[in-house]
Image: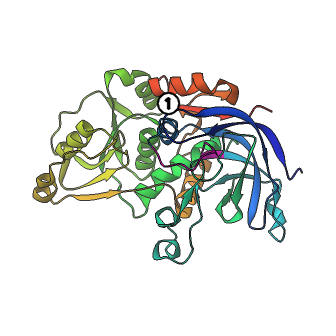
Amino acid sequence: MSSILTGIALTKQEHGRGGAVLQNLQVGPPRPGQALVQVAAAGICGTDLHILDGEWPVRPPVTVGHELSGVVMAVGSGDDSTWVGKSVVSEVFFGSDGTCNECQDGHRNLCPNRQSLGSHVDGAFGPGVLVPVQNLHSLPASIDLVEAALLEPLACATGALCDPAIVNPGDRVLVTGPGAIGLLAAQVARAAGGEVLICGRETDRRRLEVAEKLGLATATEVDEPEAFDVVIECTGAAAAAAACLTAVKRRGRYVQMGLFAGPIPVDMNAVCLKELTITSGFGATPSGFRRAIRLAADGSVNLGALITKTAPLSEWEDIFAATRRGDGVKFLFTPDR
């Protein structure tokens, strides 16, 4: 297999809004400790929109994209050659020092010296990507290689909800936001035994229909104060956060997964008066990936139902516009070969 891949890549050329262009790129060969992965598919994340808008820290020029699946083409000198030819997904975080408490505890996502694929280090919107061998996770044959690009956001959901376990069998669970993270979190909560209701707006009708096809109960508004054992906020909207604080039971659990555009007013008195437990999750951990792979492999989580369209990188402007409009749930790029 080749140790160098060439093709079109979408790169962020400068700080600030815009500055994204398609260009020919050569990726590889891998250095010791690295693997060269030929990208099969790469998902668009809300972070990618923020990167293009100049609202997320980047180190340009950098190839965008961090949700990927692919096949290992080569590894660096001295690395385990049995990885070559395997179908894989990769963790996002690079450059962790390995010595801090967070790294030692298996949470490289929280290392103060971490770097991220697709913002600090060249990412997956191209023909291939170089990643640390330690970041690789092998895929079982039961998981479709293109659908596997959704395992990274699924791993974010499993990390937030399973480490430690948030949902108990029989819990009533409210999920706000029927986007990709919301739909994945809802499926993880159901797999844990929760009775799940996913809530969106009228403008989310297309996404709510996907939820219904997954067998999830849906609503466009919830008027049930203190009715839910667990609330999972996946929109990053202040109004949704407020609704969750109202909907959660006393001594209930509030999970914040959506990222807000900036500081928001929060009724902290509700946290105190209800004795709420508030948790969250940032990025995906190694254990989060392992759980995500198991849930997708055994059919507990349906990844394919969330894919609205798969398109070549040459259509990136149209696909990013559709993502901004919320025309579907998840859009994937496949490299222009």
Describe the element under mark 1 as helix, strand or loop: loop
Q: Is residue 39 magenta?
A: no
Residue 55 rendering spot, x and y as whole percentages = 44, 41
Residue type at mark 1 is Val
Residue 146 rendering spot, x and y as whole percentages = 68, 39
**Relative depth, front residue between 149 and 262:** 262
Q: Is residue 66 magenta?
A: yes
**Relative depth, front residue between 204 and 68:** 68
The residue that label 1 is drawn on is 329
Q: Residue at x 80, y 53 (%)?
A: 28
Q: Is residue 4 visible?
A: yes
Q: Residue at x 55, y 40 (%)?
A: 302
Q: Which image quadrant is residue 312 in?
A: top right
Q: Which residues are magenta?
A: 56-68
Q: Which image quadrant is residue 197 in?
A: top left
Is 24 drawn above or below residue 319 in the view shown?
Answer: below
Q: Is residue 217 left or right of residue 53?
A: left
Is 128 drawn above or below residue 102 in the view shown?
Answer: above
Residue 199 rendering spot, x and y as whole percentages = 32, 33
Is 72 drawn above or below residue 107 in the view shown?
Answer: above
Q: What kind of secondary structure does the magenta stretch mostly adopt?
A: loop
Q: In which quadrant is the C terminus drawn?
A: top right
Is 200 drawn above or below residue 155 in the view shown?
Answer: above
Q: Is residue 192 left or right of residue 4?
A: left
